[in-house]
Image: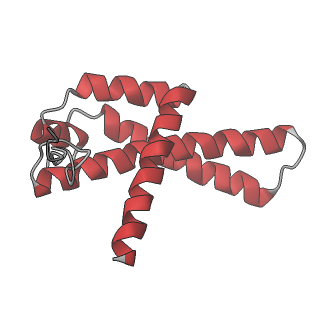
Amino acid sequence: MLRPKRARADVGRSTLGPFGPEQRLWAAGLIEDIKDLAKAVRQIEAIDALVAAGRQTEELLEQREAWQEEKEYLHGWFESDKVAPRSFAWICLVLSLSKSRIRERVKKILEGDEQLIRTLRELKRRSSGRKKLRKAA
């Protein structure tokens, strides 16, 4: 006897879990901040490699300084325990996330954890694919 196909339970579900719309917004923002930190780390490493190869220019050094400022700002934001609207601690509270667990991942990014950085790139690729699908519809 043939059974009708069941609808998959996860179709149309957010990868951000069972959050409401506002929580999904804060979670997406937190993911973006983590990706921005990873990007700053990668950019600094790339510029350092160019400088080491003898391709040092004033513009390159200015770019490195800007990325370093971004990295330090985000690192400070993740390390802050201040509970105020839009702060890291506040977002973790709203999303019921462990600050220490998120900070462990941030530390891995700062140390250049390639597996975690690849995971973040994959998340970015997936989210940009969804945006393209929505625009096409």
Residue 11 or residue 54, whichever sits in front:
11
Residue 63 or residue 132, whichever sits in front:
132
Residue 85 located left or right of residue 69: left
Residue 93 located left or right of residue 88: left
Residue shown at 14% from the left, 50% from the top? 23
| Residue 86 visible somewhere in the drawing | no
Residue 63 located left or right of residue 28: right
- Residue 103 on image: x %, y %: 34, 27
- Residue 28 on image: x %, y %: 28, 51
Task: Please name the colour scheme applied to the rendered image.
Answer: secondary structure
| Residue 4 visible somewhere in the drawing | yes
- What is the quadrant of the C terminus in the image? bottom left
Residue shown at 78% from the left, 58% from the top? 58
Residue 105 or residue 10, whichever sits in front:
10
Q: Which residue is most to the right?
A: 54
For the image shown, how many numbered marks are present on the structure?
0
Q: Is residue 61 above or below residue 131?
A: above
Residue 32 located left or right of residue 94: right
Residue shown at 39% from the left, 76% from the top? 136
Q: Is residue 121 above or below residue 130?
A: above
- Residue 29 on image: x %, y %: 29, 52
- Residue 85 on image: x %, y %: 14, 50
Q: In which quadrant of the rendered view does residue 57 lie? A: bottom right
Q: Is residue 59 above or below residue 93?
A: below
Q: Is residue 33 above or below residue 22?
A: above
- What is the quadrant of the N terminus in the image? top left
